[in-house]
Amino acid sequence: MKKRPIGFIDSGVGGLTVVKEAMRQLPHEVFCYIGDTARCPYGPRTPEQVRQFTIELAYFLMEKDIKLLVIACNTATATTLTTLKELLPIPIVGVILPGSRAAIKATRNQRIAVIGTEGTIASNEYQKSIFRKNQQIDVVSLACPKFVPVVESNEYTGPLAKRVVRETLMPLHKTKMDTLILGCTHYPLLRPIIQDVMGQEIQLIDSGAETINEVSVLLDYYNLAEANPNSDPLHQFYTTGSAEMFKRIASAWLGFDHLVVNHIDLKEIEGKYGTE
């Protein structure tokens, strides 16, 4: 059981920011990741579509014999976390609650901003999560629909990214928030630009990275942690889109020269799993 992989699902490459933190905190674990690049972005889609897609990805990973599932996508977490907890017999972690906790701890003036996809922002899940713990905190939300396409096209360090981030985040300068939640796992790839645009005094919260703290605790709680210091993890990466594009971004972000990425045709998972 301990040697089984930890599964990660995302709408594309964004969840790799969570995997990077997992590799740092949990170096002996094996990771199995699928990015649904062919149907990315999830943000503009209906909750019903996102729920169906997420369930399909989750069952795909269940066939890989995973021991724990990380929904490394804020939109998917907002729509499907509760459903998957009812459907699957393994521990499941989403990215919203850990990010909310970290922001509450970080803020000094009780003003927090959240940026995310249209779907995540429309769900109000970050506000709900924060208010359940502290109703005195002021939360401002902003949808950033152009961020994910910039990252997925591998343009997240260029002039296009700088212009898109600067123009999109302009409304946040009018607020008095001191803490900004990166409410999409794609956004940490834009973190240097976001920090530069918002100013060094603003604390950025990476909800995906915070999630791995919770994963570590659950592995210990359920006695699932791989503790073999001699293990050489062989990670598995799958994408429904271009394996070459995915590999290019993943290799650069994770620092691996010989990353193996497998393409999965949508026909292999589409409509295969229902919600019943």
Image: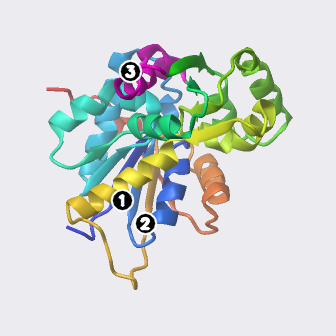
Query: Which amino acid, mark 2?
Result: Leu
Is residue 57 located in the magenta-colored stretch of the structure? no
Is residue 120 located in the magenta-colored stretch of the structure? yes
Query: Which amino acid, mark 1?
Result: Ser
Q: Position of residue 118 (x, y in %)?
A: 53, 17
Q: Which residue bears the numbered disc 3?
A: 128
Question: Upstream in the sequence, badge 1 or badge 3?
Answer: 3
Marks 1 & 3, CB-CB < 8 Å contact: no
Does residue 145 appear left or right of residue 103 in this picture?
right
Rendered-image quadrant of the C terminus: top left
Q: Which residues are magenta?
A: 117-136
Q: Position of residue 253 (x, y in %)?
A: 64, 55
Can residue 246 be seen from the camera position used here?
yes
Q: Which residue bears the numbered disc 2?
A: 26
Q: Main secondary structure of the magenta part?
A: helix
Q: Is residue 170 above or below residue 162?
A: above
Q: Which residue bears the numbered disc 1?
A: 216
